[in-house]
Image (tube, rainbow, N blue to C red):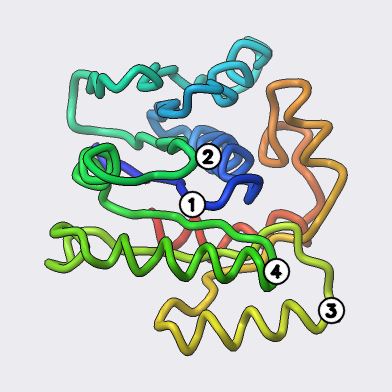
């Protein structure tokens, strides 16, 4: 069972959007997918409750109270919507569950400062130091041509975490969140929207 943790110490970065979209993308491929919600707000679980039964199945796991119940079998993917402000033993426990760690962030100086500090803390954890989990940094709500995006690309590169992909700021994500669906669910979004996710999906598959 491959486990992907989506997390950032900075709130409002879009981690639930990434968790739900990735879960839907892999489910659309016919893979066995679980969505584990480790955040007390339980936004991912709320999204699953709104999800129409006609769409590809995504199984729910409630990790919001600290328990990490694992599904039976070794096949499939677990996408973990991590809590905000991940620190201490909670961080160690969730990172210990992860094969990959996806860190979304917004293209702003404030977000990079907070995320850079978060990445430094992550890099000190034993599983990361030993190379047993890979950190994948992605830019979210990007607007092309803005100077802050260019600066973010440079800062991430210097820090040793070059951006895997950049997801544009589109109103379609809010619409899908409200209906329990994603850009990968039928009818799928346009090719240019889906193409922004492909580098991250390939890195995780």
| CB within 8 Å, label 4 to label 2 | no
The answer to whether residue 154 is left or right of residue 30 is: right
Cα distance in 3D space between marks 3 and 2: 26 Å
Q: Residue drawn at (40%, 27%), measured in percent from left and top? A: 36
Mark sitting earlier along the chain (1/3): 1
* Circle nearer the viewer, 3 or 2: 3
In the picture of the structure, the residue carrying the numbered disc 2 is: 19
Q: Residues within 10 Å of mark 3 (few under 14, many from 20)?
A: few
Please identify the quadrant where the N terminus is shown.
Answer: top left
| CB within 8 Å, label 3 to label 4 | yes
Q: Residues within 10 Å of mark 2 (few under 14, many from 20)?
A: many
- The answer to which of 41 and 43 lies nearer the viewer is 41
Mark sitting earlier along the chain (3/4): 4
In the picture of the structure, the residue carrying the numbered disc 4 is: 107
Give the number of marks: 4
Tell me, for residue 8, which label it has, or none.
Answer: 1
Cα distance in 3D space between marks 1 and 3: 23 Å
Q: Residues within 10 Å of mark 1 (few under 14, many from 20)?
A: many
Across and down, in percent, residue 165 comes to 59, 68
Tell me, for residue 166, which label it has, or none.
Answer: none
| CB within 8 Å, label 1 to label 2 | no
In the picture of the structure, the residue carrying the numbered disc 3 is: 146
């Amino acid at each position: 069972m491959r486990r992907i943790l989506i997390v950032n110490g900075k709130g409002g970065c879009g981690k639930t959007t990434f968790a739900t979209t990735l879960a839907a993308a892999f489910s659309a491929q016919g893979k066995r997918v679980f969505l584990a919600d480790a955040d007390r707000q339980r936004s991912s679980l709320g999204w699953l409750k709104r999800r129409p039964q006609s769409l590809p199945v995504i199984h729910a796991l409630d990790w919001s109270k600290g328990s990490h119940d694992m599904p039976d079998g070794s096949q499939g993917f677990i996408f973990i919507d991590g809590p905000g402000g991940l620190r201490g033993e909670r961080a160690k426990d969730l990172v210990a569950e992860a094969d990959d760690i996806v860190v979304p962030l917004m293209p702003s100086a404030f977000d990079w400062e907070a995320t850079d500090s978060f990445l430094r803390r992550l890099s000190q954890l034993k599983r990361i130091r030993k190379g047993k989990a890979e950190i994948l940094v992605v830019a979210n709500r990007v607007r092309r041509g803005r100077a802050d995006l260019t600066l973010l690309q440079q800062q991430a590169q210097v820090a040793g975490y070059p951006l895997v992909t950049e997801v544009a700021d589109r109103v379609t994500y809010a619409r899908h969140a409200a209906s329990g669906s994603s850009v990968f669910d039928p009818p799928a979004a346009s090719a240019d929207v889906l193409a922004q996710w492909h580098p991250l999906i390939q890195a995780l598959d």
